[in-house]
Image (cartoon, rainbow, N blue to C red):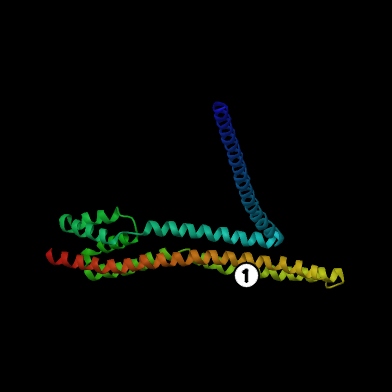
Amino acid sequence: MKKLFALLTVAGLLTFGTGNMALANVEIEQQDETAVQVEETVTTVDEETTTTFHEVLKKQFIDGGWGFMSLVLVVLVLGLAVCIERIIYLTLSTTNTKKLLAQFEETLNKGGIEKAKDLLRNTRGPIASIFYQGLMRYNDGLDEVEKSVISYGGVMTGNLNSGTSWITLGIALGPMLGFFGTVIGMVQAFDDIAAAGDISPTIVASGMKVALLTTVFGLIVAMILQIIYNFILNKIEGIVNDMEDSTISYMDILNAYSKKH
């Protein structure tokens, strides 16, 4: 009887343990399936959100009227092209003035004027070009060197600012085209009201929406170009300040060299 009781007890424990394990496995599988479903749902929602955003943007652009909206888009593309060109030019025009002045002073003292000219001729940037133009007038005296540096500095400053007027034109032209499209859209909306013979809220709302879309996109274009334009102006200002500061040190180096020779 004791053996039979013991066998029944062991069998019951095994059965209970196996049942718990089975239940645990079922629960784990259910949790995994739920997690997968949640992840798929989130992914689907994200994809639908992204797709909806692009579709809405495209729809709003088309609803604004392809004629004026295309003009606004052209202004944005051309403005960005000029901005990119200016940023590349200004980046290439940036010079480490402290390093250049140190190399210039060392080369001038060791190799003379001709070696200094070679250094400046092979150095990129407007500051090196200004220094080179100054050395071209060294034999005429330091006063002529200073005049040459000031004159050529003005030329370099003009080159740095070249093309920025087109960016300001894009900043002004984008909203202007938008407003013009809005006026045309309003006229068309009133024509629709006149043709319907009734001031229906649906007709008025749809006409107003289409008319104002050009203004919205025009203002967006102006804001984008304005931000980039301010960045370009800040970069130009930094280069001009470096030109002015380095020119003072440049004249001091030439003055000290002329006294020794």
Name the residue at 22% across, 66% down: 140
Image height of 36 relative to 6, above or below: below
Report the number of discs.
1
Crowd band around label 1 with a 10 angstrom C-alpha radius: few (<14), some (14–19), many (20+): some
Question: Residue 27: x percent and y percent?
Answer: 60, 42
Q: Position of residue 69 (x, y in %)?
A: 66, 61
Of residues 146 and 241, which is closer to you in this image? 241
Across and down, in percent, residue 143 comes to 24, 71
Residue reaching furthest to the left:
260
Q: Quadrant of residue 24?
A: top right
Left or right, 18 with respect to 64, comes to left
Asked which secondary structure carries label 1, the reply is helix
Determine whether 244 is above or below 62 in the image: below
Instruction: Name which quarter of the figure residue 191 lies in.
Output: bottom right
Q: Amino acid at mark 1?
A: Met
Q: Residue furthest right?
A: 197
Left or right of 260: which side holds 142? right
In the figure, residue 89 lies in which quadrant?
bottom left
Q: Is residue 194 visible?
A: yes
**Pick the front one: 133 or 257:** 257
Q: Quadrant of the N terminus?
A: top right
Q: Quadrant of the C terminus?
A: bottom left
Q: Position of residue 138 (x, y in %)?
A: 22, 64
Picture layout, residue 59 above or below residue 8:
below
Quick check: can you spot residue 148?
no
Q: Residue at x 37, y 66 (%)?
A: 238
- The residue beneath circle 1 is 176
